[in-house]
Image: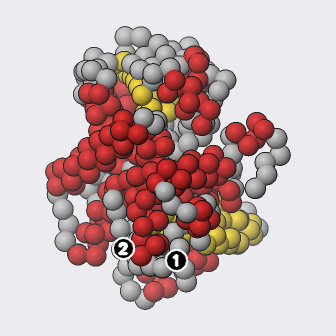
Amino acid sequence: MVAENSADSKNDILLSTQEVIKEALDKLGYPNEAFELMKEPMRMITVRIPVRMDDGKTKVFTGYRAQHNDAIGPTKGGVRFHPNVTEKEVSALSIWMTLKSGIVDLPYGGGKGGIICDPREMSFRELEALSRGYVRALSQVVGPTKDIPAPDVFTNSQIMAWMMDEYSRIDEFNSPGFITGKPIVLGGSHGRESATAKGVTICIEEAAKKRGIDVKGARVIVQGFGNAGSFLAKFMHDMGAKVIAISDAEGALHDPDGLDIDYLLDRRDSFGTVTNLFDDTITNQEMLELDTDILVPAAVQNQITEENAHKIKADIVVEAANGPTTLEATKILTERGILLVPDVLASSGGVTVSYFEWVQNNQGYYWKEEEVQEKLREVLVRSFNNVYTTSQNRQIDMRLAAYMVGVRRATEAARYRGWI
Ligand code: GLU
């Protein structure tokens, strides 16, 4: 694959994912065919979804589903609704799901889906038709034992409910295990909605211990106020940390004495926008460069690059978003002694509780919130320390260590199956 120019290739998430996968497999001593198998999804399905819009006209949307690797079990991963969705992005994200499942040790391979659309400009009825249309288009290749979708950027439990209902009708069977992130009343799990942020919180606590930082009183910056960012700001605030800045797509708010997070949560809209209500905002870039103890990019890709990595003043960077730091920036941060906890580890709390949800659906027996939280903590603490120890023992950064831990299980399973 050749990117158009070097700037593009540096920010090309599929190329940079492949680069680290290759390095991880080489370090683990696997032959090149392992890389050939892992470098792209085993299946990439493109669908066209006609939707009758509210104005009576039909609009045809394009959607994707990538199934990266099913050597271990069904593929698993979210579906995003966003105008910038591309086939390449969905491919890279499906690889990351294989890595996440490997890191937290789930019986899944990675999957990911996306539809090119702008949900902020669509009505409830149009979104329902689009969600149902996506499931109809993919019904033969997804299912509780094949490929299990979940929420991602701009999709939520209501969209999961429509998708589950559509699949159940096609299957002529109530199939809650087809999708995770459902409302509790339809078989969703306690703790799923806040699971990504809970996982990030646990990684922050573990990383802070390694660096001798007390989370209570520590200064925290959270970029992004969507599902992960907003819950995270709340958890940090409740733990006694000082959340000195938050941001959304429109701008950032900064108060060195700590922001009133409960007030901001109260005023945020359903797409995570709140800064538009204030005059004294700063830019996202200015916010990333503020002096802080902990920085959590929880928004979009390519936020910390070689342009600004030298100016980051945090001791710890924990990636709650998928792909916020480029590989060049990872090197710069590591050289500067900043502890970077990579996305594939830090954001794996979501898929972990999705797995708990699927297990509960399969058993028809539901767990209490405390049970979910206890199991999530156990998984994340173990996974964090496994990746941290690998990075220390091998003298490598935590991203490469996480890729090594993550890719190993799927490769091993593929080998036992006789694929490579
Ligand atoms: N979309 C989330 C992620 O990127 C969750 C996936 C899931 O729960 O299956 O990890």
Question: In this view of the protein, which residue sits in the foreground, 25 or 238?
Answer: 25
- Mark closer to the observer (1, 2): 1
Ligand 1 closer than 8 Å to label 1 CB: no
Circle 1 crowding by C-alpha within 10 Å: few under 14, some 14–19, many from 20:
few
Question: In this view of the protein, which residue sits in the foreground, 42 or 37?
Answer: 37
Residue that protrudes farthest toward the right in the picture: 4
**Left or right: residue 288 compared with residue 362:** right
The reply to whether discs 1 and 2 touch (Cβ–Cβ < 8 Å) is no
Which residue corresponds to the image point at 64% horizontal and 70% vertical from the top-left? 44
Give percent across and percent down for residue 88.
68, 56
* Residue type at tag 1: Trp
Query: Which label was assigned to residue 183?
Result: none
Residue 257 visible to an observer of this rendering:
yes
Residue of label 2: 177
Q: CA distance from mark 1 to mark 2?
A: 28 Å
Residue 248 visible to an observer of this rendering:
no
Give percent across and percent down for residue 384.
32, 42
Q: Is residue 207 above or below residue 283?
A: below
SS state under label 1:
loop
**Left or right: residue 114 compared with residue 266:** right
Give percent across and percent down for residue 93.
56, 55
Q: Residue 316's quadrant in the figure?
A: top left
Question: In this view of the protein, which residue sits in the foreground, 41 or 272?
Answer: 41
Residue of label 1: 419
